[in-house]
Amino acid sequence: MVQLTNNTLFLTAIAMLAFAANSILCRLALLNAAIDAGSFTFLRLVSGALVLFMLLKITAADSQTNKPGNLKIKLASALLLFSYALSFSFAYISIATGTGALILFTSVQITMIVVHIWTGSRIAKMEYLGMAVSLCGFVYLLLPDATRPDLYATLLMIISGISWASFSLLGKRTNSAIASVSKSFFGASILAIGLSPWLLDWQQITGEGAALAILSGAIASGGGYALWYMVLPRISVLKASIVQLSVPALALIGGAVLLNEALSYSLVLATLLILGGIALVFLAKK
């Protein structure tokens, strides 16, 4: 079993809060039509790359790396990050928030658990129980608000979830979180710049939309992903997959507090189930 220090738990919590904040910022921007999906993706990736580059220089972090296949990992990470961000933004044009979150994090969960089992890792009984409790809470939270999704949007969100799960799994192989995430963002931003004639629509970008996209990229994405990459080598694939189920609950709570969305009894109960299941997984002993 992977032992977790208080520092790891703290960093994990902050990373999940950053992910939830990113969801709220994305909802604000796209649902209010303050910016189009392509432009949001472009500004999110480029701003994240710039901030991480400055952070990399300040901390003098180095990826150490002359390991075989390292270049392939860097290229794969950049492609996966770009795929996640682009698919996520465009999926939310025509899919309900709850349905999209359900598809996204279910895809993440299934992908990471399949890899966990495929690599020969055993799952303890308490981990099975924690997974079941979290998934029950997750379904209870989102299904009442879910609608029949558009097929194209559903496929995009599945691609986004698989891309994010794969990006996270590659993060377990890194030795320098800031350097690795910076290079992933740099590669993804190069792709975005190359595709800018098809991504950017200046007529659709408002000041509010640009600010939300930049805040999403610079703080919620860049900072959150750097923390996540610091945590990943310290926890198992199973724990990494389960803990991300807290993000939709945290995002909905944030929406209630910051966006005046209704905070219902069912939301509170589902949140307790999700976080309780996560606690069981983290406390599991083989």
Image (cartoon, grey):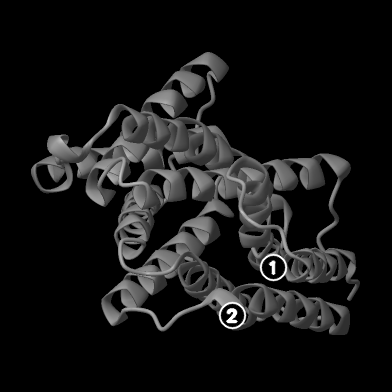
Residue sitting at 53 percent across and 57 percent down? 168
Q: Disc 1 marks which residue? A: 242
Q: Is residue 200 visible?
A: yes
Residue 24 in the image: state x and y as whole percent. Answer: 52, 47
The residue closer to the viewer here, 260 or 234, is 260
The residue closer to the viewer here, 21 or 190, is 21
Residue 137 in the image: state x and y as whole percent. Answer: 73, 75
Left or right: residue 149 compared with residue 112: left
Q: Give the CA distance from mark 1 to mark 2.
A: 19 Å
- Characterize the local packing of mark 1: few (<14), some (14-19) or many (20 or more) Cα atoms within 10 angstroms: many
Q: Quadrant of residue 35?
A: top left
Check the image and report above or below for 237 versus 29. below
Residue sitting at 61 percent across and 53 percent down? 261
Residue 173 in the image: state x and y as whole percent. Answer: 55, 53
Badge nearest the viewer, 1 or 2: 2
| Disc marking residue 223 | none
Residue 124 in the image: state x and y as whole percent. Answer: 83, 81
Left or right: residue 276 compared with residue 240: right
Q: Give the residue furthest to the top.
A: 58
The residue closer to the viewer here, 138 or 280, is 138
Check the image and report above or below for 98 versus 190. below
Q: Disc 2 marks which residue? A: 143
Sooner in the amino-acid sequence: mark 1 or mark 2: 2
Quadrant placement of the N terminus: bottom right
Residue type at mark 2 is Leu
Residue type at mark 1 is Ile
Mark 2: secondary structure:
helix
Mark 1: secondary structure:
helix
